[in-house]
Image: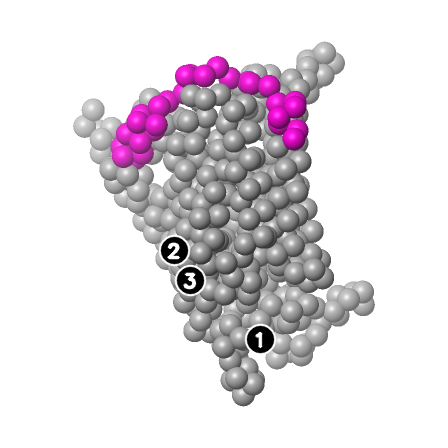
Amino acid sequence: MGTNESTTWKFPATFWIANMVEFFERAAYYAVFIAITLYLTNVVGYNDIWAAWISGGFSAGLYFLPPFAGALADKIGFRKGIILAFSLLSIGYLFLGLFPYKLMVIPTLVIVMIGGSFIKSIITGTVAVTTNEENRARGYSLFYMVVNIGAFLGKTFAAPMRINIGIKSINFFSATMTILALIVVYFFYKNSNQRGEGKSLKETWEGFMRIISNARLITLIIIVTGFWMIQHQLYATMPKYVIRTVGEHAKPEWIANVNPAIVMVFVVLITQLMRKVRAVSSMTIGMFIMPLSALTMALSPVLESITGQSISIFGLFTLHPITVMLIFGIMLQGLAECFISPRFLEFFSLQAPKGEEGLYLGFSHLHSFLASLLGFGLSGYLLTEYCPDPRFLTAAEKLHAYDKSYMIWYYFAAIGLVSAIALIIYNFVTTRIDNKNKELT
């Protein structure tokens, strides 16, 4: 028994190297991503709408491209692919810091997007081929722990850098992280797969076309997009919203960290409690929690009317009511994610034709592709309307410019509620169709 326990913790060196560089990459990515809209407006000079669409396109590409980058990595080998990826990321982050100009930023973000797409596919592929049936569950749990720790620390470091040195400094931090990862993979990462084993780019594209022609799957993707549109506001809306309404001293990076903290603490417990419940039932609970999170954020004026502009937290420090309600709202988001994320892949695979589950799961993040575009895009217009850039306001306008900034969250609460109701209708309709098909056969 002791031998079996010890062998399930034994992984080849490539597994540990992959997890180490994944830590570097996640820290680099989230440090930049939490401040990306601030960087595009305050440093590069875009308005809120342009900054939102550019950020959304960047995020969307990172969810759309990995299956295609993975197909290419399978052909050239994981080692060449991961060296290429970290080279692109290092160049991209360095250029974002050195050349923060409109002419340079979009092509540079494309470089980062392509590099990040390779990382997503290669690291998960490495974990898959360096684990076996005995230790695969532990391997993936370690991998996801590393992902969360990297994301958490990246955002934690970003706040003092932005406030004390400037937003541009974050890009140099991220470049340092990916250069360290490049050095590690160049000297220590060994090929963990054989070239030519995976699908070709043509086969991957054909698979994608089959998915988007499947009305049932596309409907599910569109419905769940509403959930992820709210989740994406951690990066699209929240940083500008809290800095403009609370002040430059606000730390949206630390506020955003509430989400992974809640997920890390509660996901195993909630998954265990919901293990005997149907996947769609667990997802529905999460879908109804999500609009409550946005509604909570919208209610900061109510709290402020009771407490004033400062709330003492156990006498240790004070927080603005807006910050307090953002934290509570993000806590609810984290809980909603615990109900949805572990079960979505299961439910999604059940909607796929028999024998093609693996192919379909490769594109299971299409909802985040859509949520990035729509969530960020909508954010730009809502910020312009309710929480405008102070650089374009007169002193008199600034006095009341943010009086209705909380209205932003009512829009997302409405989107979340419609999505939750749509999921119930979807489940009712598809269950009836399936039952009728069973009767016919």
| Sequence-wise first label, 3 or 1 | 3
- The relative height of residue 391 versus residue 277 in the rendered view (above or below) is below
Q: Which residues are magenta?
A: 183-211
- Residues at badges 2 and 3 in contact (C-beta under 8 Å)? no
- The relative height of residue 43 versus residue 32 in the rendered view (above or below) is below
| Residue 302 numbered tag | 1
Which residue corresponds to the image point at 62% horizontal and 59% vertical from the top-left? Answer: 167
| Sequence-wise first label, 1 or 2 | 1
Query: How far from the left and from the top, in percent, is residue 338?
Result: 55, 44
At label 2, which amino acid type do we have? Leu
Q: Which residue is mark 2?
A: 374
Q: Report, in whole angstroms, how far the alpha carbon at label 2 lies from the one at label 3.
A: 13 Å
Q: Which residue is mark 3?
A: 50
**From where the camera sits, is residue 259 visible?**
no
| Quadrant in which the C terminus is drawn | top left
| 333 vs 126, nearest the viewer | 126
Q: Quick one: which residue is furthest to the left in this view?
A: 440
**From where the camera sits, is residue 171 visible?**
yes
Which residue corresponds to the image point at 42% horizontal and 64% vertical from the top-left? Answer: 49
Q: Quick one: which residue is furthest to the right in this view?
A: 315
- Does 195 appear in magenta? yes
- Residues at badges 3 and 1 in contact (C-beta under 8 Å)? no
